[in-house]
Amino acid sequence: MTTPQELLLPATRRALLHRIAVAQSEGRAPSLVAAVVRGGETVWHGARSSVDGHGPDENVQYRIGSITKTFTAVLVLRLRDEGVLDLGDPLEKHLPGTRAGEITVAELLAHTGGLAAESPAPWWERTPGSLRPELTDVLGEQPFRHSVGRRHHYSNPGFTLLGALVEELRGAPWQEVLRREVLQPLGLHRTSGRPEMPHAGGWAVHPWADVMMPEPAEDLGRMAPAGQLWSTTGDLARFAVFLARGDDRVLSADSVREMRTPAAPPEAADLAAGSGYGLGMQIAHRDGRTLVGHSGSLPGFLAGLAIGVDDDVAAIVLTNCTSGPAAFTVAADLVRIVAEAEPRIPEPWRPVAEADSAVLELVGQWYWGTQGFGLRWSADGRLTLEPLSGVGRGAHFRPDADGTWTGLDGYYAGEVLRAVRRPDGSVSHLDLGSFVFTRQPYDDGSSVPGGVDPEGWRGIQ
């Protein structure tokens, strides 16, 4: 019988072990635990520890810091999918009296609300949450640092507001809602608001000496939705599968895809670094691939969850030191190692179950003015528009009940593609957001805006 560890080649497993061993040693971490997921299941687990014989396994809890934000975002998207709120709603509509009510739900999820990065002193991560019992204590007298919606500015208080929004609309504490609506359905039984044995202790390692001291593990109170959770590599592996594929018991594949889609204007430095932010999820472009997930840190702990959706590989790295290994970077490296050493084998090509003559009439070559495009229908039921030159605007389209198609990405995201028919029922041209696509360049048999010169095409006179 093949064990999960044997699902990867020996050379790949050694490369993964080498990467976390270097991270633990050079990062001077008391312990580090990691897991890799491929094809929806955990295929590798590794650990390094400063104490012989005490390497953590996939069931040992670590604090995951801001990965908590992704869990909170899932709760908010559930409310949206149920029709309880709209992402464009101002916070005031559902949670009045916060002094930040003009910010929309989407802006809070994407950190574009202009709020301060942290709550007022004392440092909230190392002091009891009871010092900030009300939202006004979390936001302070001057909650804003920037104009609403103008820039991406990471805000922990912003996710406190989202947690309070969940509590207001569900009528129950944030942790209770999370347990009932996310943790239990996904089988994340080792994820909790407070540590449960076995769990790692958090440590501060001296920057100039090989000594360390324990860090406090405070209950964050109101700030819990921004960073409270404890979890394991085993649970986060299952969570990574959910974030890549969706689960209709919690959120659909379309909704988790929306979470992974850039939603915040990046700073110039972010563009240079290839990083962005969706709805409760970080986005990074590294080594030619797009990764999504989140990093996390609280005194005594660092965490990273990185998902290469196109490669169908995810990695989790947890460690128990305040500063040290860059957990998300290490997780990204684990994804790269597997993706490059053992590239994903695509599923066999299969034809559609049933041909649709109305769709077949649309596929093939089209022209927008003089630029050629190909329109292809795939077995997943979607249309793909691609410039024949490889340069220009392309997009994928999903079918609508009325026979039109809606753009899913790129320039044409949200735009409607429809076939315009002649009186005899044949297709004259395609209309895409008012752009006319014809079977021939400037086809005089179609309704080309501005008309077609009656003398037609010509050479040099």
Image (cartoon, rainbow, N blue to C red):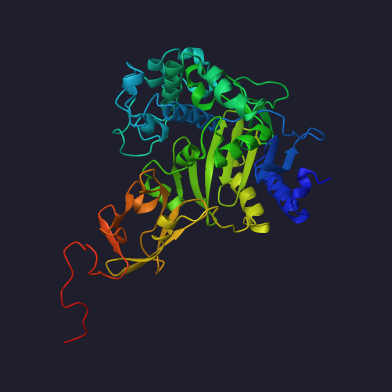
Residue 394, position as x, y percentages in the image: 39, 58
Query: Where, by quadrant of the figure, is residue 376 drawn?
Result: bottom left
Residue 46, position as x, y percentages in the image: 73, 42
The residue under the point 40% across, 17% down is 135
User: Among all residues in the image, which is located at the extreme bottom?
Assistant: 461
Q: How many marks?
A: 0
One can see residue 320 in this view: no
Residue 219, position as x, y percentages in the image: 56, 18
Q: Nearer the viewer, residue 202 or 183?
A: 183
Q: Is residue 424 left or right of residue 26?
A: left
User: Among all residues in the image, which is located at the extreme front?
Assistant: 424
User: Among all residues in the image, which is located at the extreme right?
Assistant: 1
In the rendered view, tell whether residue 393 sits above or below residue 416. below
Q: Is residue 188 left or right of residue 110?
A: right
Q: Nearer the viewer, residue 109 or 429?
A: 429
Query: Where, by quadrant of the figure, is residue 341 drawn?
Result: bottom right
Q: Quadrant of the N terminus?
A: top right
Q: Is residue 105 left or right of residue 331?
A: left
Residue 455, position as x, y percentages in the image: 16, 78
Q: Nearer the viewer, residue 372 or 318?
A: 372
Q: Quadrant of the C terminus?
A: bottom left
One can see residue 459 in this view: yes
Query: Where, by quadrant of the figure, is residue 317 drawn?
Result: top right
In the rendered view, tell whether residue 38 sits above or below residue 127. below
Q: Is residue 127 left or right of residue 431?
A: right
The residue under the point 56% across, 35% down is 247
The residue under the point 40% across, 23% down is 84
